[in-house]
Amino acid sequence: MSTSEFSPVLFRLQRSELAVPGSNPGMIEKAAGSEADCVLLDCEDSVAPDQKSQARCTIISALHEIDWKEAGKTVSVRINGPESTHMERDVGRIIEKAGYHVDTLLIPKVGIPKHVHAVDGLISVAELAAGITHRIGLECMIETALGLVNVEAIAGLSYMPRSRLEALHFGVADFSASCQSRTLEIGETDHFWHPSLQRMLVACRAYGLRAIDGPYADITNPQGYINAAKGVAAMGFEGKWAIHPGQVKLANQVMSPTDAEVEQAQKILNALDQVQSSGQGAVSLDGKMIDAASGKMAANIINKSLAIAEKASG
Ligand code: GLV
Ligand code: MG
C-alpha cells in the first residue's frame, strides 16, 4: 500500500445501482433487463417483516434463473442489518443456495467495524459449505450517526489481509432519521449532508473504496435527481442509487464523463507528453496552467471512459 496514492481495491463500473425489493419477482426481472450497472436485490427495508422469508426464496430463484453475467450486471444482495434477527439467515441461506451468482453483499446500518467482521465470518462459513470459489465482496451502508463517526475505521478495513470490502454507500434516508433532521424528504436535501458525504467520500478514497450515493425518492422529478447526482459526482462519488428504472439512465448519464471532458482530458495528457522530454513541470494549455496533478485528473476521466466503452462493447 502506498502511503500517498489512492489505489482502488477493486474496480467495478457502478454508475447506477438499481435497488429492487427482493419480494417482487417482476421488478427483479425488469431490473435484469435495465441499463443499470448494478442490481441490488433487497432483503431489508423495502421488504415487509412478514415477507422476509419469501423474499429470500425469491432472491435465490432469481439468482439462479436469470443470467446476470449475460445481462452485464454486478449483482449485490442487501441483507438485513447487523442487529436484526434476519441477518444470519439472509447470509447463510442466500450464499449457500445461490452464492455462486452473488458478486457482493451490502450491509446496511454499519456502525462499527465489528459489524463488518461478523458478516465476513458468516460469508466465509457459507462459502465453504457451498464450495464457492470466487470471493464474494462486501459493501457497507453509512447511514447512521454512529456509522459516520466510525467511517474511517470502517473504510480502513479494506487494507486488512483478505478483506472483502469494496465500497461504501451513503444512505440518506436512514441518516436523516438517525440525525433527527427536520425533513421528510429522501435525497432532496443533499446540501445538508455535504460535510457528511464529503467525509465518507474521503474515507473511501483514502482506502481505495468506491463511493456510492443512495436514493432520491421523488421519481416524478428527474431534474431534482440530476441535480443531486451532479452534486455528488463533482465531489468524486462514482455512482448513485436508482429506486425506479427511469432513474437508471439519469445516473449513467451524470456518472459518465461527457465527450467534451474526455476530449479535454486527452488534450491535457497530450500536452503533458509533449513537454515531458523538455524537462518542464508545469505548462500552459489554452491559457491555463497544467502540471502532473492535471495529468492524474485527466487520467481518471480517460480511465472511466475506457471502462464505459469496454462495457458498451460487451
Ligand atoms: C437507504 O437505505 C437509505 O436509508 O437512504
Ligand atoms: Mg437505509
Image: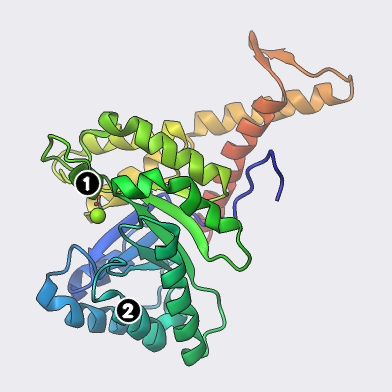
Residue at 30%, 45% (x, y): give it.
145
**Taking 68 as reference, is 128 above or below it?**
below
Q: Position of residue 194 (x, y in %)?
A: 34, 31
How packed mark 2 is, by other alpha carbons closer than 10 Å (few <14, some 14-19, many 20 or more), is: some
Residue at 33%, 38% (x, y): give it.
229
**Taking 126 as reference, is 69 above or below it?**
above
State the mark number for residue 178. Answer: 1
User: Cα distance, mark 1 to mark 2?
Assistant: 24 Å
Q: Amino acid at mark 2?
A: Glu
Q: Amino acid at mark 1?
A: Ser
Residue at 32%, 67% (x, y): give it.
82
Q: Position of residue 122 (x, y in %)?
A: 43, 78
Whether the residue carrying mark 2 lies under 8 Å from ligand 2 is answered with: no
Q: Is residue 151 visible?
A: yes
Q: Earlier in the sequence, mark 1 or mark 2?
A: 2
Q: Position of residue 121 (x, y in %)?
A: 47, 76
Q: Nearer the viewer, residue 230 or 80?
A: 80
Residue at 40%, 73% (x, y): give it.
68
Location of mark 2 (residue): 88
Q: Quadrant of residue 161?
A: bottom right
